[in-house]
Amino acid sequence: MMLNPAIWYSDRELTLIPPHFVKCPTPVTTDSLDWIRNKTTGRFVLGPIDMDNSSPIRGMPISMRDYNKHYVYFESTSDATLYELYWSGSN
């Protein structure tokens, strides 16, 4: 398997949700988070379910048990579409 250095050596996971990011309605699981980190190329943010687009994540570490309580926000609409096509209905 070939690794893409642009994916592995860039800061793609942000701590704040910019207003132009797209929220995906399918909650994040541990498997889908691994998929996001390995298969998408753009920037993304994990945000709590009750968070709106203007609220920041305060740098709080997320434990593995808490991933299913979060949504993912993508900067790229193509990453968001790909995520939804692959993971919707799996939760």
Image (tube, rainbow, N blue to C red):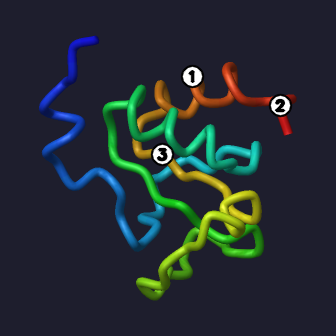
The picture places residue 31, in percent across and down from the top left corner, at 62, 39
Residue at 47% x, 59% y is: 45
**Residue 28 tag number:** none
**Residue 90 tag number:** 2
In this rendering, which labeled residue sits more in front, label 3 or label 2?
2
Looking at the rendered structure, the secondary structure element under dot 3 is strand
Residue at 71% x, 66% y is: 65
**Residue 82 tag number:** 1
The picture places residue 8, in percent across and down from the top left corner, at 21, 40
Q: Amino acid at mark 2?
A: Ser
Q: Label 3 vs label 1: CA separation?
A: 11 Å
Residue 20, placed above or below residue 61: above
Looking at the rendered structure, the secondary structure element under dot 1 is helix
Between 35 and 84, the residue placed more toward the observer is: 35
The picture places residue 55, in percent across and down from the top left corner, at 55, 81
Structural crowding at the residue carrying mark 1, measured as other residues with C-alpha within 10 Å and reported as few (<14), some (14–19) or many (≥20): some
**Residue 74 tag number:** 3
Structural crowding at the residue carrying mark 2, measured as other residues with C-alpha within 10 Å and reported as few (<14), some (14–19) or many (≥20): few
* Nearest to N terminus: mark 3 or mark 2: 3
* Nearest to N terminus: mark 3 or mark 1: 3
